[in-house]
Amino acid sequence: MDISVFDKYYKEYDNWYERNKFAYFSELKAVKKVLPKKGKGLEIGVGTGRFASVLGIEFGVDPSGKVLEIAKKRGVKVKLARGEKLPFRSSYFDYVALIISLCFVKNQKAVLREAKRVLKNKGKIIIGIVDKDSFLGKFYMKKKSIFYKYAQFFSVKEVCCLLKNLGFSRFSYYQTLFDLPSRLTRIEQPLKGFGKGGFVVISAFKKDDLG
């Protein structure tokens, strides 16, 4: 992903959430379904802090300095860094979130491996994606927006395969966005599972290394 795109269009990126409030609030509700009520959290690809600041995720990293300026103003403790090399010691966080950011990283396996490293044993990973197999994924792949034309979309099954190969287990899924964001007229209630919603939240736990 060319980070200069986010540095150049950071205002457009942040304004999307204002223009599509019902989609944004629906996504927040889906993430809240699996978000721990307490503990130290990190968002990889925190962007302008739209999710971390509202969800109470204390720390955030992003390779774009422009978006981090906004996230910092929203109260997130930010660090300029890539997900492939996190500036935190091992077993530091209770949970790690990647919300609509996995599709923008260069090396997904390396980022997830780092996420696992900084997670405590039995810590939780939370990944929010636009499902490649959904109507919304197909729409964005065809539309080629400023940001999504650089994205590598994933299906739920592909993300789960990556996580399983790293030793994550105890998966759960919630879905929302059952129409295009621009068409929504209310906040949608997230449903368990996947296959219908355009936005899917996948969560899983790091296995205890001691067995």
Image: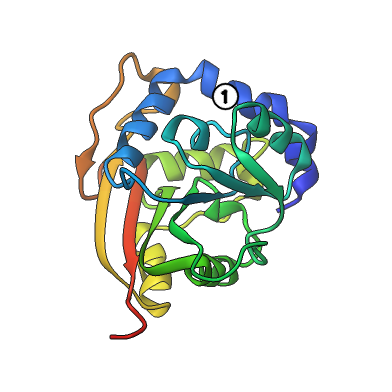
Q: Residue at x 74, y 31 (%)?
A: 9
Q: Is residue 113 or residue 148 the one in the foreground?
A: 113
Query: Which residue lies most toward the top here?
Result: 185
- Up-down: is 208 above or below 179? below
On screen, residue 194 versus residue 108, left or right, reads left
For mark 1, does the 10 Å Cα neighbourhood hold few (<14), some (14 to 19), or many (20 or more) residues?
A: few
Q: Is residue 2 or residue 72 the one in the foreground?
A: 72
Q: Is residue 181 or residue 170 the one in the foreground?
A: 170
- Label 1 sits on a secondary structure element that is helix
Which amino acid lies under the numbered mark 1 shown in the image of this protein?
Trp
- Up-down: is 17 above or below 51? above
- Up-down: is 178 above or below 83? above
Q: Residue at x 64, y 45 (%)?
A: 149
Q: Quadrant of residue 56?
A: top left
Query: In this view of the protein, can residue 197 be seen by the observer?
Result: no
Q: Position of residue 191 (x, y in %)?
A: 20, 39
Q: Which residue is mark 1?
A: 16
On screen, residue 147 versus residue 182, left or right, reads right
Which quadrant of the figure contains the C terminus?
bottom left
Query: Which residue lies most toward the left here?
Result: 192
Q: Residue at x 34, y 48 (%)?
A: 201
Q: Position of residue 89 (x, y in %)?
A: 60, 68
Q: Position of residue 146 (x, y in %)?
A: 68, 36
Query: Which residue lies most toward the bottom here?
Result: 211
